[in-house]
Image (cartoon, rainbow, N blue to C red):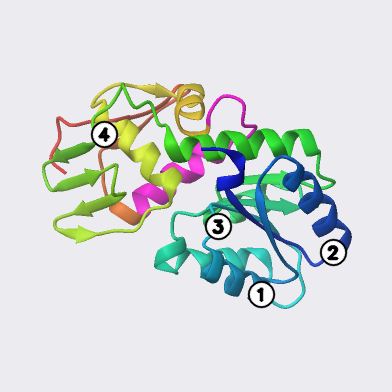
Amino acid sequence: MENNTWKILIVDDEPDVLEFLGYNLEKEGYSVFKAADGKQAVKVAGKELPHLIILDVMMPGQDGFETCRILRQIPELKNVLIIFLSARSEDYAQIEGLDSGADDYIGKPVKLSVLKSKIKALLRRVTTFDNNEIAEIINISDIYMDREKHIFQKSGKTINLSKKEFDLLFLLLSHPDKVFTRNEIFRKVWDNDVIVGDRTVDVHIRRIREKTGIPNIYTVKGIGYKFNCNEEL
């Protein structure tokens, strides 16, 4: 897709940040929309249905974490890509951001080159995910996954997963008993030019386990993760 077909919503209560990011992303050819707070962001996102949202964390009233959770509850926006911006660099803040449903987390002040790289990499994952490597549909025991339609069902019940959660789980289930290192998972799900925290994969695995109840996702200490298909689900 050309850049001008991608829609990006920038949410920040600082006018200078909105202007700076908006100007530079429009120069890259993106269609840019802006919101000055969380509530406005939800309205604009619901109307414009952006492909990606750049969301500030520290905003008065409804902060970024709460806004992210609200966005994820809207069916049309459950798969929208979300990048948090925050001056808070603590691990717990980044984990809270990922737990609330974000796909990535960037510290302030924003390095424009890093942001552009992350945006390109994330948007690339919308259209390509190792298309020649894995099937489109997985049906194991009571688990059903349709990659094209982004459907996950267990025992006939549909469970909503974020895009990263879905892609990570699909990767594991498409290669039963294969041990994926964290670096492999980064490369295949986040792409190798995206800078993410050390705990990112662990947080997403934990969320997948909690949401799906699948007991067969094993941690291989010091290496990574695998899906064991030899045990009952």
Other residues around mark 3 within 10 Å, as few (<14) / some (14–19) / many (≥20): many
- C-alpha distance separating marks 3 and 2: 21 Å
- C-alpha distance separating marks 1 and 3: 14 Å
Other residues around mark 1 within 10 Å, as few (<14) / some (14–19) / many (≥20): some
**Residue under label 1:** 40
Horizontally, is 217 left or right of 202 in the view?
A: left
Q: Residue 115, position in %: x, y?
A: 72, 40
Q: Residue 223, position in %: x, y?
A: 45, 21
Contact (Cβ within 8 Å) of mark 1 with mark 3: no
**Residue under label 2:** 14
Circle 3 or circle 2, nearest the eye: 3
Q: Nearer the viewer, residue 199 or 193?
A: 193
- C-alpha distance separating marks 4 and 1: 39 Å
**Residue under label 3:** 50
Which amino acid type is marked by label 4? Leu
- C-alpha distance separating marks 2 and 1: 14 Å
Horizontally, is 109 left or right of 107 in the view?
A: right
- C-alpha distance separating marks 4 and 2: 43 Å
User: Between disc 4 and disc 1, whose residue precedes?
Assistant: 1
Circle 4 or circle 3, nearest the eye: 3
Query: What residue range appears in magenta?
Result: 191-210
Residue at screen point 47% across, 62% down: 77
Other residues around mark 4 within 10 Å, as few (<14) / some (14–19) / many (≥20): many
Q: Say the numbered circle drawn on residue 173.
A: 4
Which amino acid type is marked by label 2? Glu
Circle 4 or circle 1, nearest the eye: 1
Q: Residue 96, position in %: x, y?
A: 60, 56
Which amino acid type is marked by label 3? Pro
